[in-house]
Image: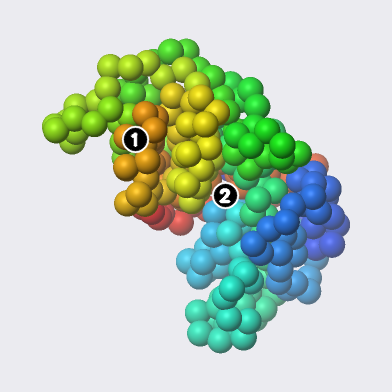
Amino acid sequence: MTSASSNKSISTQALTQFCDDYLSASAFKDYAPNGLQVDGGRPIQRIVTGVTACEALIDAAIADNADVIMVHHGYFWKGEPAPLTGMKGQRVRKLMQHGISMIGYHLPLDAHPVVGNNAMLAEMLDLTVTGALYPNESHPVGNIATCTPQSADALIAKISQALGRTPLHISAEYHEDARTKTSDRLIERVGICTGGAQDMIEQAAIMGCDAFISGEISERTTHIARELGIDYFACGHHATERGGIQALGEIVASEFGLPVTFIDIHNPA
């Protein structure tokens, strides 16, 4: 999505403050800092959004003459080396050399009830969010949703159309010909958490879900799904997390009247 061009500009701080407030960023204890991560030092006139602040996205932002990139996966994750060397140093150096700021939101963008990754994926799949996967969370990063009762094959078709890729499906019922056969049971109550949340499948089963949708899959996920009797759909980390940052970009474009372009750097994972 690209909004109309404009001669307007805003400060990096004004953009960050708006997004911080809109996403309630301060309410989250996260694995990386949320908000402004790299300050390019110039006013914002053009914005690029993307899922991950990889070098390919930075190069695309440079070509677009963007002043800031807004992403879901930024930098400075817990446990990673602090020095700006190697790949991380190259990325930050390129941003600074071109005066491009970088703003990132992780869990706040997963959890937002309107533009969050879960909310957007649920909307794309005609799911109605009804509550939290973990009921005691004030800002839940996983949700429970309901849908018209449907077969696993029907849900696979819907996911494939919405995301442009076929999910990996693990049936709740094990069959010797599991590669070609899916269960006849109907799915109505669905747990959903985008990205790398495959281990929340146990909580989805505890909460009485018929199926759980996330991005990634681990070897153990297959056995958990079969033994707990819950269908699992691994739809791709990247694919399930495109919606939130696109929706946030549209909110920013409407709020500030600035051109915002979503750039999708293909990632099959």
Task: Tell me the quadrant of the picture where the C terminus can be found.
Answer: bottom left
218 horizontally vs 124: left or right: left
Q: Position of residue 35 (x, y in %)?
A: 74, 60
Residue, x 78% and y 74% (percent of image)?
41
Q: Earlier in the sequence, mark 2 or mark 1?
A: 1
Residue found 72% across the figure and 37% down from its top: 136
- Comparing 113 with 28, the one in front is 28
Viewer can see residue 102: yes
In the picture, the disc for residue 235 is none
**Is 215 rendered above or below residue 148?**
below
Q: Answer left or right for 124 relative to 134.
A: left
Which of 198 and 258 lies nearest the eye of the viewer?
198
> Is residue 66 visible in this depiction of the protein?
no
> In the rendering, at what x and y percent does residue 74 appear?
61, 63
Q: Residue at x 68, y 58 (%)?
A: 30
- x and y percent of residue 209 in the render? 49, 26
Residue that label 1 marks? 227
* Quadrant of the image containing the N terminus: top right
Residue position marked by numbered label 2 in the rendering: 262
Please say if 128 is above or below 239. Answer: above
Residue 59 appears left or right of 183: right
The residue positioned 68% from the left and 33% from the top of the image is 135
Q: CA distance from mark 2 to mark 1?
A: 40 Å
Q: Secondary structure at mark 2?
A: strand
For the residues bearing labels 2 and 1, Cβ distance under 8 angstroms? no
